Amino acid sequence: MTRYVIIGGGPAGATAALEIRKLDSSGDILIISNEDYQFYKRSKIIKLISASCTEDELFLKGKKIYDENNIKFIKGYTKKVIPEDHQIVLENGTFYQYDYLLIASGGSPIMLPWKGVNLEGIHTLYNLEDAKKVAEQVCNVKRVVIIGGGTIAMKVIQNFKKVGLDISIIEKATHLWPIGFDRKVARIVEKKIKENGIHIYLNEEVVEFRGKNNKLNSVILKSGQEIGADLAIITIGMRPNIDFLKDSDIKIDKGVLVDMYMKTNLSNIFAAGDVAQIYDPLYETPILHPTWGNAKRQGKIVAKNMVGGNVKYQGTIPIQTIKIFGFVAIAVGITHSRKSFDEISLVSFEREIARKFVTKNNHLIGVLVLGKDINKKTLKSTLEKAVFNQIILLDLRKLLLAEDINFNVIVNDIKGLI
């Protein structure tokens, strides 16, 4: 009987486990997770804050999906991997043997050593437990400060708005959502955010949290400003969980280095999801791309290869989307221009639209679109394929800059070039 051990129960690990079971009905499958929950959709946890969904609705496949597929699931923290013995060791001293190992350990939110960071009311918002803690407090607070203006911040704003909180956002960069927007495009969304009564502090950093009776009362900025706060959400990024691999022979960099078959430098050890550092055809180097969609795709491929297949993963490019106050924004590939790149763009502050197409030698390497009449589901997948294939844009330039762009036409034209 083949022994499959999976470290991590997120989308990569869960998808891989279920796919392995389809391909190997008798193998022994073990998932070790640092959460005491079977597979749930992490991207929806923010909706718990405003009661826009229930906890049960997060479990897309039910709460007993592993039991139903004869997959063993335990909560535990991996201390180390011993490849020469085909063994992993947990922090409680328990060890497990494997024939094939999948590292899908995900990441952890970045926390800086701020003064007062341990006060009651300060949270990250990465997993279900985080969301439940925040949801328990929102009804008893009036002021929330969101630290970081990235993807999570953009998604959580509206949920805090629904419950009537006074909201402040603190962002170190010159504008919100710096991963996708440039300063000019960001102004469109920032205007709408401010119109909804939300305070934005740009080019700012937190230096201290202050409290009364061990409860958060205010946040101190580098400029010296003091912002009243009963609740603070830290969303400044995440780091892959790879510390337990540092004394192993598994090659790591920012994450776990894998080839196009999701395999590490050791033939029976694989990695997938947020922790996998894999070749990016745009940057032409191994990069981390922590998104739900990438994790699921990688989970399916790695499962096939763990049971003896030879399926090649085609690579990953950056892709992020947000929906906020009626706007939809899609950022695919490289959306920030450089000296060696060309840019086709149209930004209208008055019409509240933006579109940017970044090219290199006439090949599309990045797209940013922002507007209120965008079919995210259709456009996102098409733009991802167009950028991944680096299509030539010569014949589309006039269409891309048309006064009243018809995205249906653009989609069809791009599909014809893929």
Image: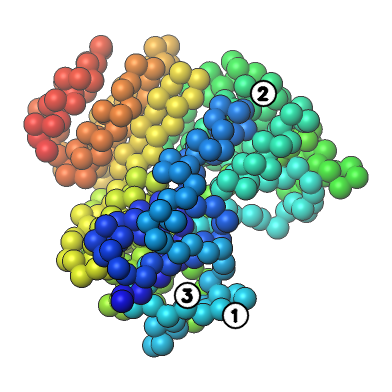
At horizontal 62% and vertical 41% (from top left) the residue drawn is: 131
* SS under mark 1: loop
The image shows residue 79, relative to residue 355, as above or below, that is below
Other-residue count near label 2 (Cα within 10 Å), few / some / many at <14 / 14–19 / ≥20: some
- Indicate the position of residue 124 as horizontal and vertical percent values: 63, 47
The residue wearing badge 2 is 163
CB atoms at circles 3 and 1 under 8 Å apart? no
Measured from the top left, where is residue 409 in percent x and y? 16, 20
Asked if residue 334 can be seen in this view, the reply is no
Tally the numbered discs.
3
Quarter of the image containing the N terminus?
A: bottom left
N-terminal label among 1 and 2? 1
Determine which of the numbered discs, if any, sits on residue 78 in the image: none
The quadrant in which residue 174 appears is: top right
Q: Amino acid at mark 1?
A: Gly
Gap in angstroms between the C-alphas marked 3 and 2:
42 Å
Determine contact: label 1, label 2, CB under 8 Å: no
Q: Residue at x 68, y 43 (%)?
A: 133
**Disc 3: which residue:** 245
Q: Earlier in the sequence, mark 3 or mark 2?
A: 2
Camera-side residue of 260 and 370? 260
Mark 3–mark 1 Cα distance, whole angstroms, equals: 16 Å
Nearer mark to the viewer, of 3 and 1: 1
The residue most toward the bottom is: 84
Q: Is residue 75 above or below residue 339?
A: below
Q: Nearer the viewer, residue 66 or 15?
A: 66
In front: label 1 or label 2: 1
The amino acid on which the numbered mark 3 sits, given as a three-letter code, is Leu
Is residue 49 found left or right of 330 in the rendered image? Answer: right
Report the residue marked by disc 1: 93
Quadrant location, the C terminus = top left
Alpha carbon distance from label 1 to label 2: 45 Å
